[in-house]
Amino acid sequence: MTYIDDIVTFIATAESKADDQSPELEWGAVRAAVDAAAEHLPGADTSLAYAVGCVVAEEVAAVLDSAKAADGWSRRSVAGVIGAGAAVGRLLDFDDAKLRHLLGLCATQATGLRSLDDTDTGSLQVAKAAVDAVEAALLVSNGFTSSADGLTGRRGLFALMAPGATPPSTFDGGTRTEGVRHRE
């Protein structure tokens, strides 16, 4: 399986563990996107969607962090939009094809400067990441398509923002059998 295959599998199949806590790191873009999408989905499992999005954001951030060239990009907004898209895709129960399109649309909108993270503009970058993820999900739900691999493709996110970074051959989440940590 490829990296994108593993991410899609993880998003679609992650299960919760009742005895676990919330994700270790707070991802503002993921939280905002889940909250916005959940307003139209009463009773949806937002905690699991949030946890899934946080795992995806952490994994994407780890790849970006492994490349010196990615130092100028804001990991909060770049990885945040991918994680937010994953969370909303999970919340909306997208199939594999829709998840791929959603992640591709999020990858094409990923942006933000690290030098602005600790300014008011940093908050705007995170908010924009959440908005972009929700917008991408709405577009995909109405038939909009994107690259089948906007992350690791030859001209995908990692090739452009983190050249030389090597994503793991297997996304940890795509093969894990245990559940995702989140607050019940």
Image (spheres, rainbow, N blue to C red):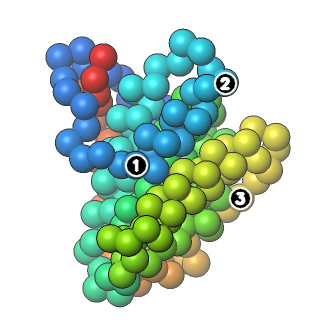
Where residue 146 appears, as percent x and y from the top left, is 71, 58
Of the image marks 2 and 3, the number of the one nearer the N terminus: 2
Q: Residue at x 57, y 59 (%)?
A: 128
Q: Quadrant of residue 108?
A: bottom right
Disc 1, SS: helix
Identify residue for label 1: 28
Q: CA distance from mark 1 to mark 3?
A: 25 Å
Q: Position of residue 67 (x, y in %)?
A: 30, 80
Q: Is residue 142 visible?
A: yes
Q: Residue at x 47, y 70 (%)?
A: 121
Between circles 1 and 3, the one closer to the viewer is 1
Please report whichever mark, 1 or 2, sits nearer to the chain's N-terminal start: 1
Residue 164 in view of the camera:
no
Residue 146, numbered label: 3
Q: Relative to 167, is 80 above or below?
A: above
Which comes sooner in the sequence, label 1 or label 3? 1
Q: Mark 2: which amino acid?
A: His
